[in-house]
Each structure stands twice: as structure tokens, then as C-alpha cells.
Amino acid sequence: MEIDQCLLESLPIGQRQRLVRRMRCDQIRAYYEREKSLQRQQGGIKVRVPPTHRKKHHVRFSLADVVQDAIISHDDKEVLRLLKEGADHNTPISSGGSLLHLCARHDNVFAAELLIERGLNVNLQDEDLWTALHVACVCDHADVVLLLLLAGVNVLLQDVNGNIPLDYTSEGTETSYILRKHLEENGVDMSSMHTMKTQRSTTMLSDVRQLVTTGGSLNQANDDGVTLLHIACASGYREVVSVLLESGADPHPADNSFWTPLHLASKYGQTSIISQLLKHGANPTLLNCNQDKPSDIAASEPIVEMLLNAEENWLQRLKDPSAPLHSTDQRYDSGLHDLNTPVKNLNPLGLPISKRDSLLEKCAMFREAGGALSRQPSQDNVLDGPFSSGASKLEQVKLMPPAPNDDLASLSELTDSSLLYEMQKRFGNDQIYTYIGHILLLVNPNKELPIYSTLVSQLYLSSTGRLCSSLPPHIFSSAERAYHMMLQERRPQCFILSGESGSGKTEVCKHIVRHLTARSSPAGFALEPRMKHVSLDLSVCIMINNLSRMYTYMLEKSRLVHLLPHQHNFNIFHLMAEGLSPEEKSALYLNNVLAHRYVTETCSIYMYR
Ligand SMILES: Nc1ncnc2c1ncn2[C@@H]1O[C@H](COP(=O)(O)OP(=O)(O)OP(=O)(O)O)[C@@H](O)[C@H]1O
């Protein structure tokens, strides 16, 4: 049944409701008929059993899924049983890689040994070409590293960034020591490794020089729009950049995602290259596909400053072309200020920039987290507020790598049992946060997890507020999003924290406030004394802004019915009495707030919590 919208709107409300209900019934009927005909086409109609006669079905998971769980939870007997029952040890895991990668990540030496005994290839590489040894090194799981070495793993296999496992160990850790010793014993000395790495930039330099002498095109782009200058800038090859620019290469070509060499150099902290590009007239105001200028994605404060000056200079020159070209600080030309990121190990022609970009974020995340292991508290206390968990906890920062089930909305199968299964799996893995689209789900771990340090807070800082695909779900990510929405929409944002008593709302509220305080002012410590009050005010603000939702979300009804002896009242009613407009009060049936029995039971004013 189709009805003209104007006609529908002209009908009296009762008639309109009846018509709409009929239309909805028609739609549902049509839907079921279509479903039935589809089932018939696929051969066989499923007969619906009335719910009362329905058999209770047990949900069965494949052996491959169950063995993964057993590995994660270190249930060794179960792993042994499942492998004996025929669980395929070659099954790839959902987050990529083999069961051995999973063992390496969860430090399960026993299961790793079983798998190796059954013939699992220790050199298997995941889609980013990481071996289990790469994973064990990132996680600093020395026992797994030893086991893999004994099993004959190839320690020189490179991932897509050209990094060998040793590149992912942190200086001074056991894994670093074991690997270095192993390399030495096998006749690989560190200087030849260094030569192997620098070889790429040397090769590119001689190739580019030859291209220049033969008069080849320096601006030639590949299918992704990536030019030689993009590659040299992202990889930090200063000399190659210099030859290209001196020989007349375009200083600001954009690839297919509108990234310019300046964007790449800025993102990967190549300060001296930025300086070179600016001297050769690169435009610092160009936007990439994310609407970011190079200064928006800069890796450090000095780079931001340098690029902002360059932007100003660029705009001045647009108005007055005779104004001098921006000159950068001589200090940067030496390269001493370049950030030491794994980008230097990039394989120049192997991958499109966008792919490398996401991989580098993943590397940076692990590396940053690893760096915190050895960091002294005094170096990392700038933004620590009153909610910081103390110096000792700074030493244990560990974020789980992103996984396909980070967002339940993206699962191919959405049933109660699949959702519960995924949640349980994540919980067992200490992945307490999960997205469902833009909603963030938290399962209270009831134990302290090392995921709230200043370092993690900084990792989640973003210039756009968009979810970062290389970071796992986190309350800091939602706080970032709210912060950017506030700037974009220029209006207050609110968090609705819903859950039963003890589910962790107050804790989450503290983390939100802490992250926002740190992100809104680099000198976050100035706000420290006010933090407790901010937390308190935030609860109250949420209540005021969402009064209509308050009943459902913020307070349980039982707490509003009556006051216990000596119990104080909610200050929110007094605030509402003072602050709400007559219209708002009328809409909430609170024309005379102070006349209510509940409010007059006690004369003392008390702030909730
Ligand atoms: N993210 C978390 N990590 C670790 N422990 C947590 C976390 N969230 C909550 N907890 C633990 O659970 C306890 C209860 O949490 P919280 O007080 O935040 O719950 P709530 O939802 O605010 O409860 P209520 O509604 O009763 O005020 C905390 O004291 C803390 O021990």
C-alpha cells in the first residue's frame, strides 16, 4: 500500500496512525513472503516450530576457535585434548597469523611447543609479514623467543617495513640480549646489520643520481600517485631528497590520497627534510584526504611551530609575492632533530604509502608502549593528574593490538551467542572496551589494568577525533571524539554513562576528565587541583543537560523514592530550582521544586557523591 506523503500529513491523527499501522503490517507481510520465496529458491523451507516445542540447542564452536581460547587462557590440558581430538594446528587465527603467533602474543610456551612438535612452520608470516618471533619480541616474551630460536626460526626475516625481530626489542631487555647473542653466535655482527639497513638509502641514492644524469622524469608517480620524493621523505633519506629537489623535482606533488611529501615528512618527524622542502617552496597549506595540513599531523611540537610559521609566510607571499621565501632554522638541517622512528627501515618501493602509514602507527604503538617499560617516572609525569596511578604503574603500559572484533557492529554474524562469545573472549583477553558502532561498551575488569597512563592518553590524541584503526577501543578515544565534536559543532557535548551499580561509570568518568584535562592544556598540571571538582561537576552537568534521560540513565529509581534517616538530599534539585527556566520547569512538572516532599524532607544541602 502506497500513500502520498502530503495526503498522509493532511489526515487527522487517529486516522493517520491506523493507516500507518496498516502500512507497517503490509511491509512485514511482504518481508516474510520475500524471505519464504528466497528460502524456497535456496531449496527447502524451514518449518517454524512454535516456541513452546522448540528444542534447546547448544551452541557449538569449531575446534579451531576453542583451541585459540584455550591458548589465550593458558589451559594447557585443553590445548592438548583439542589437538588430540583433531583441531587443525594450521588454522589461521582471526587477527591474522598462525596459532604460534597467538602463543607468542600470550606467552604460552607450552602450547607453542606442542604446535612446533606437530610440525607447525615456525617461520610462518602474517599479512604484515610478522613471524611469531616478531610478536614475541614486541611483547618481550623471552621464553617464547628462546623456544623459537631452538626450533630454528629464521631471525633475519623482515616484515613489510623491512624490520627484523631484533628491531622490535627494547634495549636492555632479556629478549634483546638473547637475540643479539644468537646473532653473534651465528656470525652476524651488528655493523653488517647496520650496513644491510643503510643499503636501501644508498641504493636509492645511486638510482636517483643515475635517473638525473640520464634525464629521466623525477616526478613520475606509481598507480597510487606516489613519487620518488614521497618515498624518500617518508623514509627519511635526506640525501635522496636533496638530490631530487636540487635537480628540479616538484616539491609538492600529491598522491591519490592528497598526501604531499611535506605531510609525510611532518608525520614521521623528519625535521631536516621538512626544512629542505620548505626552502624549495613546498606549499605547507595543502590539505590531504582527511583535511589535514602537514602541521595538523606533525610528530612533534617544534615541527608544528616550524610549519605554522611557514604557513603564515606562505599566506603573506600570496598577498605580496615579493616577500622573501620562508627560511627555516639552520639547526634542523643537520638531521639531529629527526625522530628516531622505525620508518627509517621502510622498504622504499614495497608498499603504498597508506598501507605503510597504518603499519607504522601499529609499530609506533608497540614501540611507545615498550619504551614505557624502561622509562623513569620523572620523565613522564608532565600530564599526570591526581588520577595517575603512581610511578610504579607507569612501568607497565600494555595495549592489545587492534583486532577484528574491536567493533561488534562489523561482525558478519550478529546473534546473541556470537556477541556473547566475542565479549567473553575479549574479556578473558583483558580487552575490556569494545565498540558497537559509536557506542563504547565496557566490561568492568575489577582489577587494575595498565592502560590508563599518560603515555596511553597521548597515544590517543588525534587531530581529527576520528577513530584510529591502529589503536584498540578505549575511553580516551571516545573522549577525543567528544572533544573534536565540541570544536566542530561549537556546542557542549555530553557523555551518557549507563550501567548498573558498580559497572564502572564513576571510574570511566574520571578517565574522561583526566584525558580531556591533559589534552586541552599541555600544562595540564595547572588544572590538577580542580580535577575532583570537575569530576563532580561533570556528573551534575550530565544530569542537568539530560534531565529527561536522568531517570533512565543516571540514577536508579530506588535512590529517589525516599530518604533514609540522616541521609542528605540531592543538591541537583536545589540547582534546578535556581537554574532552570520557567519553561523547562513546566516541561518537567517541577514548577515549584521546593514544594516536593522529597526535597523538603531535609534542609541540608548535599552534593551527590
Ligand atoms: N575500568 C576499570 N578498571 C578497573 N576497575 C574498575 C574499572 N571500573 C570500575 N572498576 C572497579 O569497580 C568498582 C565500582 O566502579 P564504579 O564506582 O565506577 O561503579 P559505578 O557504576 O559508578 O557504581 P554506582 O552506580 O554504584 O555509583 C570500582 O571501585 C573499581 O574497583
Image (cartoon, grey):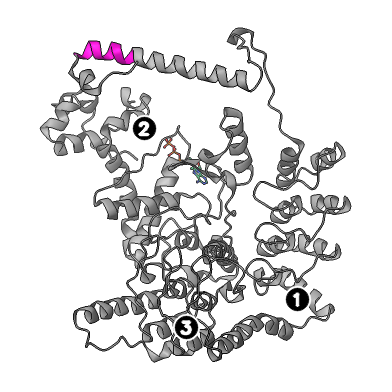
Q: Where does the N terminus fall, quadrant-wise?
A: top left
The amino acid type of the residue labelled 2 equals Tyr
- Residue 410: x and y in percent read 53, 41
Majority secondary structure of magenta residues: helix
Q: Distance between the residues labelled 3 and 2?
A: 50 Å
Residue assigned mark 3 = 337
Residue 384 lies, in percent from the top left, at 43, 63
Residue nearest the observer in this picture, 404 or 601: 404
Secondary structure under tag 1 reads helix
Q: What element carries label 2?
A: helix
Q: Name the residue under label 1.
A: 180
Q: Earlier in the sequence, mark 1 or mark 3?
A: 1
**Residue position for label 2:** 553
Is label 1 or label 3 in front? 3
Q: Position of residue 60 (x, y in %)?
A: 71, 28
Neighbourhood count class around disc 2 (C-alpha, 10 Å): few under 14, some 14–19, many 20 upward = some
In this rendering, position of residue 380 left or right of residue 480 = right
Q: Is residue 21 above or below residue 180?
A: above
| Residue 173 located within the stretch drawn in magenta | no
Q: Residue at x 85, y 50 (%)?
A: 114
Q: In the picture provided, is 175 more to the left or to the right than 355?
A: right
**Magenta segment: does it hold 17?**
yes
Q: Judge by depth and name the residue closer to the eye, 195 or 482.
A: 195
> Which badge, 2 or 1, is on the more N-terminal residue?
1
Q: Earlier in the sequence, mark 3 or mark 2?
A: 3
Disc 2 C-beta below 8 A from ligand 1: no
Which residues make up the magenta segment? 12-21
- Find out whether the residues at labels 2 and 1 contact each other: C-beta distance under 8 Å: no
Q: How crowded is mark 1: few (under 14 residues within 10 Å), some or many (20 or more)?
A: some
Q: Where is residue 238 in the image (x, y as percent from the top left)?
A: 51, 85
Q: Would you say residue 335 is visible in this rendering?
A: no
